[in-house]
Image: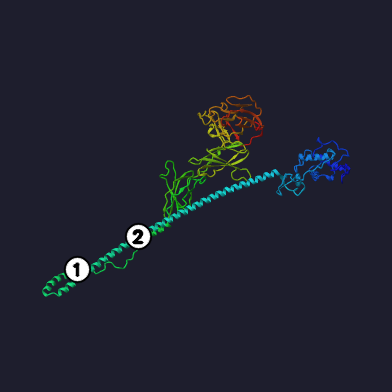
Amino acid sequence: MTSEPRGAVKGKPQRDLEEDVDELVHLYGLEDDDELGDEFVNVNTPRIEISEYSPYMMARREAAMEQRDWRCSGEAAEAEDLSFGGWGSEGQCQDLREAYRYTHGRASEEYECYVIPEEEDEEEAADVFCVTCKTPIRALEKVLDEHKEHEVIPLSKALESAKDEIHKNMYKLETQIIEMENFASHLEEVFITVEENFGRQEQNFEYHYNEILETLAQKYESKIQALVEKKKERLEALYGQLVSCGENLDTCKELMETVEEICHEEKVDFIKDAMAMADRLRQFLETKTDVEISAQPALEDQNLDFSDVEQLLGSINTIPAPSAPVINPQAPNSATGSSVRVCWSLYSDDTVESYQLSCRPVQEGSRGKDQAEFTMTVKETYCSVTNLVPNTQYEFWVTAQNRAGVSPASECAVYMTAPSPPVIKTKEVRSCEEAALICWESGNLNPVDSYTVELTQAETPGASGVTESVVGIPTCASLVQLQPRQSYTIYVRALNVGGPSARSEPATVHTTGSYFRLNEQTCHPWLTVSEDGLTAVRSERRTPAGEPPPSNTHFTRCVAVMGDLIPVRGRHYWEVEVDEHLDYTVGVAFEDVPKQEELGANCLSWCMRHTWAKPRHKYEFLHNKMTPDIRITVSPKKIGILLDYENSKLSFFNVDISQHLYTFSCQLHQFVHPCFSLEKPGCLKIHNGISMPKHVTFY
């Protein structure tokens, strides 16, 4: 700091400094600050030497000058919010106030060094994020540095974006972890299954080999026992022969000795003994001596029978007959109108060469009895059965077989074919500008679960497929909300447990206005309805032969006809083309309006009636035989009728001159029919399916 006068500022005139300060004050809106003086102090007031400004102040001052030139164009910047760097913050304005005080003598005469730590500038938080460089930057760097042409966003937004990205990655990681855990669980199940299967196989082999060893041991014991018995028998026979031979030898020796002794005796004794010895010798010689060996020493060939052992060995590799398969319940959308896809499963350790799938139709009260069956052979655990009847239940069961035999039959399962496509009743379709009532026939003898209406905007360029679907419809009619002034192609499908039917034949609906036809079933016998259902004619040639008999369906006294019911809430508009010399009545009526009374003569109808008696036209707006006193000066040739269900109003208009004629406030507690009558020969032509004119929309 220095006490030199202003003129002693190094390298810069005093006036330039004052102008710079004024520009700073003007830039940051400090002119009206009560802390600042209204004018500069005397030239002798001590001030700060330029060379002794802190680097921080000089940098802020120069940056402010450049930023003003960049952001401002000669206009006051008092309320401008400089988004880069936060120069409009309270702390920075305070710095400038302090500088202003020093330069204008508001500080004390003895100046102290105004030092701002460099750490404040270094620790200043970055407030923007460079998307190009993917790094946070300071606002001044954005303006003055290489980030000037880069895309930047607020740091808070970048932080939120980074958090969102991290959350997305965490969600992906969690999803991947779940998938890996599921896969690991599946691998573990497969590992356990393989281990169990091989364990069972090992037990099976061990059992069979133990059985074979036991059988061989039994055969060995039995053969050894037989050999021992044979040996004993032979040895006993040989020993018996040996003993007999020994006894015979002993007897022979004794006889020889006796004979020798007799030979040495005297004659008389010799003769006596010789006679006795002769008898003895004769008896001995007559005794036959067995000199053949009863047991031969050679061993006989022993043919061992190992057929049972071979059978046991073969049984190790023999596959057992499979167990009964398990037929699966019918899967959703697995059938068409003429086919079903049947699936079943088998135990994992069973070996199967083929399957026999059997089927028969199910009829009420005779399930599984006296029904024609057919069977097919398949290799897989599924089969598509074709040539079936739509919307019909079939009973299926399956057996498995291999070379060892056939398994028991599975439990029976009932499958159902998809329904036949419904048939849209085109003549009964009703529409207005915001909705359409679609009616159809089921097309199936048996009930179905529900119906689906599919809509396609026919006039949308490039439209394809289904633009809207209404599902879960329990009956054969549906009120569908639509967009005004559009054309729709409508299809209907029937659904059951087997799946959806094919599409019905299409029907076209236009939402350019309400559409209905005249109902011939309500027509008086003297009236004729045209083929398109839009014109009612009373012929001049027909001579009334008296009133027809009373009826609850068609008019008998009033020569009238009713249009189809308008069962769609909203606003409906149609027009009737009339002759100004024709006696007619047009309006609406409930379905149960008395057919033996005139239209407008009861509380169930609201009508406009015209009677012409030359040269006077009489117009009446009738409800329950009452009419207001209204005069119509211009006879309409085309009458517009607006039915407003929501506001319970019925309005009549002269279409040619866009004139409102009259409006009924009706109690429309149910839907109504348009109605028309002719008191004299002539015709009424109806125009419907048309857009509502602008003058009608105000009523």
In the image, what residue type sits under mark 2? Answer: Glu
Mark found first going from the N terminus, 2 or 1: 2
Q: In front here: 470 or 445?
A: 470
Q: In front here: 521 or 372?
A: 372
Residue 287 is tagged as 1
| Category of crowding for the residue at label 1, using alpha-carbon neighbours closer than 10 angstroms: few (below 14), some (14–19), many (at least 20) | few
Residue beneath the point at 69% across and 45% down: 158
The residue to which callout 2 is attached is 221
Residue 200 drawn at (x, y percent):
45, 53
Q: In front here: 355 or 402?
A: 402
| Category of crowding for the residue at label 2, using alpha-carbon neighbours closer than 10 angstroms: few (below 14), some (14–19), many (at least 20) | few
In the image, what residue type sits under mark 1? Answer: Thr
SS category of the residue bearing label 2? helix
SS category of the residue bearing label 1? loop
Q: Quadrant of residue 252?
A: bottom left
For residue 620, above or below residue 227: above
Residue beneath the point at 56% across and 49% down: 181
- The reply, left or right, for residue 361 in relation to residue 562 is left
Residue 156 drawn at (x, y percent):
69, 43
Q: Quadrant of residue 18?
A: top right
- Can residue 410 be seen by looking at this rendering? yes
Q: How is the image coloured?
A: rainbow
Residue 530 drawn at (x, y percent):
56, 36
Q: In front here: 69 or 237?
A: 237
Residue beneath the point at 51% across and 52% down: 191
- The reply, left or right, for residue 129 in relation to residue 607 is right
* Quadrant in which the C terminus appears: top right
Residue 663 drawn at (x, y percent):
63, 28
Number of marks in picture = 2
Q: CA distance from mark 2 to mark 1?
A: 44 Å
Q: Mark 2–mark 1 contact, CB under 8 Å? A: no
For residue 377, above or below residue 266: above
